[in-house]
Image: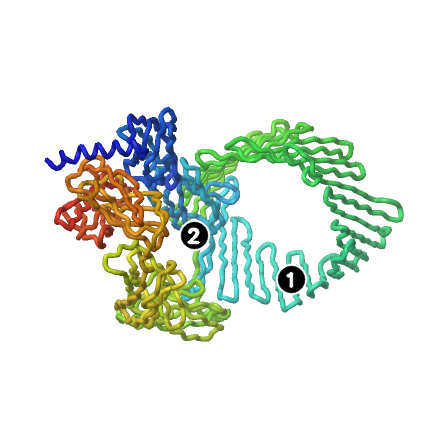
Amino acid sequence: MASCTRQRPRLALWIALLILLGGPGLGQGVQVERASPEVKKAAPGATVTHVFVLRGSGRVQVRLASQHGWPLLTRERTVALEAGRPYYFPVTLRVPEGVPAGTRDRLRLQADGGFADAFTEAAYAPGLEARWPAEVAYLPPLGRFTLEVANTGNGADVVLVRLTTLEGVPVYQARLPLEAGERRELRVTVAEPRVLRLLVRLERGGLQREGYVNVQPARAKSDGAFRLLGRAGVAYRYPGDLSLALGAAGPLSDFAQFSVGAGYALGSRPAGSLGLSWQGGYLSAAFGPSYGVALGLYEGAVSTQIAFSGPVRRGSMNFDVSGRGYGFGAAALLDEDPSLRLSADLATGRDEAQPFRPGTLSAELTLRPARPELSGQLAYGFSYRDWPVRLQGGFTGDAAAPVEFRFSADVNPEPFSLGGRIAWTGLGVRDWGVAAASSSERLELDLPLPVTFGAAAGPDRLSGFARARLDLPAPWGDLGAEARVERRAGRTTFTVSGSSEASAADGLALIALDGRLGWPLDLNEIKLGLRMGGSELRTRADLTWAPWKPGLKTALALEAPAGGALLQARVDREWYGDRTTLSLGAQLPLVLEVPPAVTRFFGGRNVGIVAGEVRVEGPERLREGLVVRAGGREARTDAQGRFRLELPPGTYTVAVDTTRLPAVLVPVRGQVRVEVRRKQRVSVRLVLAARSVLEGRVRVVAEPGRELSPRRFAVAIEDAQGRQTSLFTDPGGAFTVPALAPGRYTVRLLEDLLPPGWEVVVAETAVELRPGETGRVELAVRPPPRKVYGGGRVQILEVRPEADRVPPGAAPLVDVRLQGAPGRVVVVLQGRIVGILLPVAEEEGVWRGRLRVPDDAEGPLALQVEATNGTTARFPFFLSVSRDAPWGVVRALPVARPGQTLAVAVHWYAPVETSWIEADGERVALAGEGADWSGRLTVPEDAGERWSYTVKARLAGGAEVELERVVLIRND
């Protein structure tokens, strides 16, 4: 206590001398205020800047503190204040990822006793994930698929799921409240195969994912029987009769498709159809009141079709030959008016020269010998100055009438389309017509909305139209509108029509409105439709009203699945005709397996066989249950590692599914490329091995006692086949590769990526890795030699201690940036050396070392850096010494979930002998040396909202120091 009393007069004298000599002054009466809004919001991962204003005089130390430890991008520093002049100090921090929305952090800026607070609130950042299969297998009576949705944002939200047909008819809907980070799976059921539109949207965040689900009949398994899928139905109509229907279709083999259908209504004859198709043709037949048979054969460019039907007997035969740039055909029809038709198409060339480009010439000639009559036509399409043009001429000759000639032309320049036709005989013109159409976009007109319009004229007829699409406010969709006027046979009509749809009840209901107004009044009509539905019940209601006809019709239809069947009911009512119709029906899905004998008769499967073995270098029990994939198909190995795949002809990559391998296995030869031919067998062999681990270290060979900053080194690892991978070590020079196939590896240091001046001591080494074992290697490097400085003037530019507030007995690092070549740099306290600094080889002009804070120091500590080289340069600075100051800094996540493992890094303000973590009565040792230590800590599953742990260390003198850390626990 007496020594402290003797030091105080000397300390006060030293401070006074600094002020008189123009040294940095102490802040007096500093006032700190906030110059920006008190609370600012930012999404996780974003940065926010708060601005403070300081008023006062002298040099003051600015300290920053975040309540929850959010990363500060602005460093604490000493600033010089001038009386009467405000000093603006901006502070930028980053909102950590994963912070829940609404979390508020307090940022405090302190300067010489004054302080001010600003608050940062984590804003809601929506996030949505949705996964579903692109194709769903429909196996009657239902098709099912799993929809996975996840709220990846930082706040609670509601996920809306809507499944509709391509026409907008609702099929399924769900509303799921999800907390932040919550993930759910939905089992969606579809009653019939079709393409559906899927929409997943966040109610609060507005994000949405949209796509399509293709529900198709399930394909036959490669090793199972082929199936015919269909339905059997029964319907009753009152007043009316009872009817039955049956239909099925599917493959008989990989080379033939088959379809069958039949129907019967009480009081009538049964009817049905059969169809068989293959790559080179088809055969179909129908029976009932109308019957017939048809055969089609295809071979290269030649095709032939023969058909016969009744009860009005008619036979036909078509013969066609087509190729690149040409086509010829002949068709004969045998009935009460037999005919023979010849046709030809010919591409006249591919010359692109302007202004005329040859096009396509087509001709057709038809002969009817029973009349007799002969007709023909000739058409030619080409392009003139990029205008598509088509010309067509024809004639019809009959013994009882004059020959009629026809001609038409169509031309489509960029702004509009024009067309005309004329027909005449020897007695004069029989018919004619002209038409034109365009749009505001083609004419480049600046109209409020795009319009399409056109007109047509002919003998005793004239018409015109205009169409547009209007945007309506939600929930209505676009309104398609059309206006049309027409005069025919002395009668003029005018109509305006439009239609739109609206979504209601969160998309579960669809309202359709269609209307037509015009003159005469009997053309006026209004239609209203309502469709509601989900996976359990679908409803449809329709209303049609024509007030001047008069006419009013309503309809109500219901559909509901029950026990695999689809039940249907419909009621139609004509109110002015006083007639009501009731319809009831049911459909039952069918699955008919094709007998193996039938499949073999039609060619069987178009597959080859891939048979193989997966060899495991390691425990033999791991050979069973491995998944091998090729061409979208997969098989599992048996106890001996054998597998079998049936694949269509082609080239495939047969590979072990590495995503489903046991954790201890890695592929050595994990895939192979094979060619599969029909009805042939291919043998393959794949090799796996128990994974090996490679541990290594890059050792730094330096003089004893020399302190170097941590560095990462680049290392390349090459296997026996020359395949190479590279990685960086951790700051301590260590690296681990946890999953390597057994074999010989060469590990070498990438010298090109070494820091300047560093030398390689051990550049390369080899290691033999055995299955399931760990191999170790060591490389070595040497840092640049310490620089020896000669004489010259020295100037100290900056002094930067690693902490401005430390406890007594600490030994913080000090960096000094200077200009010149000093022979010695030390830190002095009242004439006594408390720290020796050494040059940093990696940074020019920087000296670094530790200073020893006295154990009895308290309050401001006036220190001085002295750099000597003939003359001595001095630079004073201050440290604040307090017994409640932290002994170091802990770097770890401020927010975690129960059971999560945290990476903890600790930097002490003095070298320590050992360091550890104490939490909930347990002790976790940390690894490291000197002042830097690290390790991992697992949060207990039952941790509360705020969970804390203590990091402790033992100093060289035996004393223990500690740091306490608080973690916010998220239970979502």
What residue is disc 1 on?
Answer: 307
Which residue position is annotated with label 2? 133
Label 1 near label 2: C-beta < 8 Å? Answer: no
At 30% from the left and 71% from the top, the residue drawn is 767
Q: Residue furthest front?
A: 870
Foreground of the two, 692 or 71: 71
- Quadrant in which the N terminus is drawn: top left
List the single residue furthest toward the right.
426
Q: Residue 888: x percent and y percent?
A: 23, 44
Residue 943 visible to an observer of this rendering? no
Residue 675 position within the rendered picture, expressed as x and y whole percent measured from the top left: 48, 72
- The colour scheme used to paint the residues is rainbow
Q: Amino acid at mark 2?
A: Pro
Q: Secondary structure at mark 1?
A: strand
Is 959 on the left-hand or right-hand side of 58? left
Using the numbered discs, state the Cα–Cα distance from disc 2 to disc 1 in whole angstroms: 43 Å
Compare residues 461 and 852 and report the one nearer the observer. 852
Q: Estimate the x, y position of residue 564 in percent, counting from the top left.
A: 40, 49
Please tell me whether residue 65 is drawn above or below residue 364 in the rendered image. above
Eyeballing the image, is 741 above or below 112? below
The residue type indicated by label 1 comes to Ala
